[in-house]
């Protein structure tokens, strides 16, 4: 009996809930830490980036309009699905980052826990960042957070999975939609995450994953008039400056790159970075002859 041939995995983009190849037809070689070939990943084009923005904008209304509790359920479902594919992701992370099996497994466990952590915040962040404001006069003055819109995310280059999820999960937990540029040298865990998102009740277009040259993809996203914010987590100093200048054209919110230990429990900074605050005044009226208000 002859040995069977291995079935090599074809990695694809994740855009609008579907798995297209790059419209350019281009691919690039992805290698491990010892320069051994792992796979060919799609080399996304500017057209792919624009298509991803269209998908993210189309999905924004439904995702931002869903209840916070429902978004939490969806994020928790992602964690459930990752738990079932733990071994696959541990293998991909080990290859991508040159880690031992045990360290890669620890990264995957932390990543699953990160989804659960943000799932728990979806219906609580409004109470922390909003509420009733003390004002003079017979008024209710209420502030509530709302999602910014479409957020471009330059994922961390070194932390291809835990870092990726640590910057994507807070964006969508608060009702935004995301266009994500995966780590240039280690995109495979991000592309596999698209397969998990597709089977985790995450509506198509809420998260869109592109692989390729970071600078080539980030430039059109930073300048795109229908992108509302950009996270520069994976950009180096020179690229970050260039992207921040481009982002100023339509007053995008910009989260600058900063040193982060992704194993540490995150705060709420990455959630509040992409929230807008809406404040409403409403007259309370008066009660009783003394003019007391309620």
Image (spheres, grey):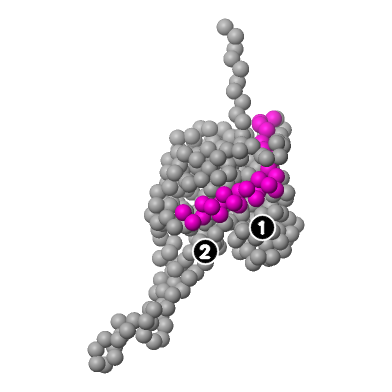
Residue range corresponding to the magenta coloring: 37-62
Confirm or deny contact between disc 2 and disc 1 (CB under 8 A).
no
180 lies left or right of 215: left
The residue to which callout 1 is attached is 224
138 lies left or right of 83: left
Q: Nearer the viewer, residue 147 or 25?
A: 25
Q: Nearer the viewer, residue 226 or 94?
A: 226
Give the quarter of the figure containing the N terminus: top right
Give residue 108's position: percent from left, percent from top.
52, 40
The residue to which callout 2 is attached is 275
**What residue do we see at 49% from left, 69% from top?**
277
Q: Is residue 33 visible?
A: no
Q: Nearer the viewer, residue 282 or 8?
A: 282
Name the image quarter holding residue 134. bottom left
Give the quarter of the figure containing the C terminus: bottom left
Q: Residues within 10 Å of mark 2 (few under 14, many from 20)?
A: many
- Residue found at the far left of this picture: 288
């Amino acid at each position: 009996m002859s040995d069977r041939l291995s079935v090599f995995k074809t990695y694809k983009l994740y855009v609008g809930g579907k798995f297209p190849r790059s419209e350019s037809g281009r691919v690039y070689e992805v290698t491990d830490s010892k320069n051994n070939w792992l796979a060919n990943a799609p080399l996304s084009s500017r057209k792919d980036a624009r298509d991803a923005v269209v998908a993210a904008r189309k999905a924004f209304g439904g995702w931002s309009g869903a209840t916070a509790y429902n978004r939490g359920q969806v994020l928790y479902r992602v964690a459930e699905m990752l738990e079932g594919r733990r071994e696959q992701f541990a293998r991909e992370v080990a290859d991508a980052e040159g880690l031992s099996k045990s360290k890669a497994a620890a990264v995957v466990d932390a990543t699953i826990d990160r989804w659960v952590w943000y799932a728990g915040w979806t219906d609580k962040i409004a109470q922390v960042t909003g509420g009733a404001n003390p004002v003079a006069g017979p008024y209710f003055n209420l502030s509530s957070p709302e999602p910014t819109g479409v957020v471009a995310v330059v994922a961390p280059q070194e932390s291809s999975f835990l870092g990726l999820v640590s910057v994507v999960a807070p964006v969508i937990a608060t009702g935004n939609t995301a266009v994500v540029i995966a780590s240039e040298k280690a995109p495979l865990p991000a592309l596999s995450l698209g397969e998990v998102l597709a089977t985790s009740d995450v509506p198509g277009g809420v998260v869109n994953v592109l692989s390729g040259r970071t600078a080539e993809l980030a430039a059109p996203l930073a300048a795109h008039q229908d992108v509302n914010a950009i996270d520069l987590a994976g950009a180096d100093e020179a690229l970050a400056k260039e992207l921040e200048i481009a982002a100023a054209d339509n007053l995008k919110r910009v989260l600058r790159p900063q040193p982060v230990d992704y194993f540490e429990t995150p705060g709420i900074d990455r959630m509040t970075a992409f929230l807008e605050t809406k404040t409403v005044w409403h007259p309370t009226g008066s009660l009783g002859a003394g003019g007391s208000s309620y």
